[in-house]
Amino acid sequence: MKRYITLIALFSLIVSVWCAVETLLDCDRYLYKYGYLRGTFDPDSGQEAPLHERTYALKYFQHFSNIPITGEFDRATMIKMNQKRCACEDVMTKETMMNTSLSFAPQQFNLGPKWSKTDLTWRLNGYSRKLRDNEVIRSELTRAFRVWSDVTPLTFREVTDRNVKVDIDMSFHLGEHGDGRFNAFDYRGGVLAHAFFPANGDTHFDDDENWQIQNDEGTEFFTVAAHEIGHALGLAHSTEEKALMAPYYAGYDPNFRLHYDDIRGIQTLYGGTTRDPFTQRPVPLTTMRPVRTPRPTLRPTPRPTPRQTQTPRPTPRQTPRPPRTERPVVTPSTREECNIKVRAAVTDFDGTLLLFTNGTTIYQVDLNRRYSPIKSDQSTKFSNPKRNPDAVYRLLNMGMTFIMKGQMIWQFDRMGNQMKRIFVQGGGYSLPERPRAVIAPTDNEIWIIMSHIVCRMTPRGEVIRGSHAYFSRTYRGVPYPVDAAVALKNDETIYFFKDQRFYEYSTRRRGVIRNGDIGREFFSCS
Ligand SMILES: [Zn+2]
Ligand SMILES: [Zn+2]
């Protein structure tokens, strides 16, 4: 008996060691598995990734995971990487996109990774070693499906007849189970489950987990099931840490409700219900709301001085290349920077702020002020620079940056290679004028800002019907038309740029909380 206990103890020790992310190579493999690390790293070679590739991937991971962006495999990073999580990748890789209907083929671009019907069927296949009662599992799954049918036109029907093919096939598995070595389950802890995008829908749970029903003593089944069903319906991981679709297991919540970000995501794919019309934050055109915050007093805007010089047109690059990590020479602030006109602004994958100005000039600004702004050219970031862009935005979990001019949107992968070009559209709902800015507070919410109107757009460039709202009622106290805007990833702060001034807007307080001179704020001008 004693020997038996020792064996069990030894076994659980092996299990806990098996899952841990401890070495730099573990770290590289983790970053690779979840889509952050691409480039020359080969997870099978046993060789660590080149330092510059790992640093970039780590910053991307830290930015996505809401931990300090250091570019180093530090303690906070190690703790995050050892949390229980979903096995699906955070950043969609090219292979995933190829395997779903979110294909790179232009003619298919507007389909998206979604089901083409709203009445879906599901079945639980086989058994769980831990949760022996299939009746209980099925009733929890029914509850998990209801989470999504409550906010969409989708309906889910369980089919028990094994001869009928179902849309979403659910089962428990151990270790390597036929989805490839990199998708193998990993004993207790680590990854908990994974699911495939439409039109596959297969959903697999790791049967080595200590599954629990409606209690927090192990891993709560309903919470994980509802998350995985989100994937089976076409949702990727959310950058919003409180969302159900965040990658990490957050524990059992007896008062579980979908997060606003989850609802935005699923309704972007399938629309809302008649009970719960399309959820949106800004005030629609037809309704009035009382002012909650007093209008801040704004200082007069200094007149911009006309530009004398023309930036020479750079030759567009044709070949793909690795992400640029070498820093251009830091130049001291000059007159030019103190009178900068920001045409577009975006946060980069590593969390720095990119300001696009006239021509193809960009400034890279560290919001934590660890280094001075770096002046460079779009060509250091993008294979095909776009002169005088109207707007720039990026989606963290697609790993894509979008540059917009008029109705045209160019899509770049995270290495800066131009992927494709799309047009804003949506059944006659095209834009009445050039966009002034585009902001994406989370990947599920993209807003186009024009002179007086704002409207929502899907990641596929379709303007969402009924999403139009007045700028003045949406962003109270911000003078308009604005030149540029960027939403910081915390979903609470938006920077607006107009002439030589910036306005820091709080979405929580619905008002401008700070404003000032761009040169003084970002370029240490006197
Ligand atoms: Zn997931
Ligand atoms: Zn699987």
Image (cartoon, rainbow, N blue to C red):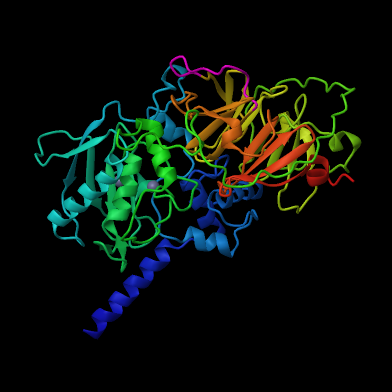
Q: Position of residue 220 (x, y in %)?
A: 30, 60
Asked if 15 appears above or below 359 in the picture, the reply is below
Q: Which residue occupies 40% across, 28% down?
A: 112
Tell me if residue 429 is in the magenta stretch: yes
Seen from this angle, which residue lies furthest top? 428
Q: Residue 77 placed where, x, y %?
A: 55, 59
- Quadrant hosting residue 217: bottom left
* Front one among 62 and 283: 283
Q: Is residue 445 magenta?
A: no
**Left or right: residue 255 compared with residue 79:** left
User: Where is 78 relative to 3, above or below?
Assistant: above
Q: How many discs mark residues in the rendered view? A: 0
User: Which SS does the magenta portion mostly show?
Assistant: loop
Nearest the viewer among 348 and 25 is 348
Residue at 18 percent of width and 35 percent of height: 166
Segment tinted magenta in the rendering = 425-436
Drawn side of residue 188 relative to residue 452, left or right? left
Above or below residue 274? Residue 430 is above
Visible in this render: residue 44? no
- Residue 21 visible at all: yes
**Position in image of residue 244 (x %, y %):** 39, 50
Q: Measuring 21% from the left and 84% from the top, which residue is drawn there?
A: 1
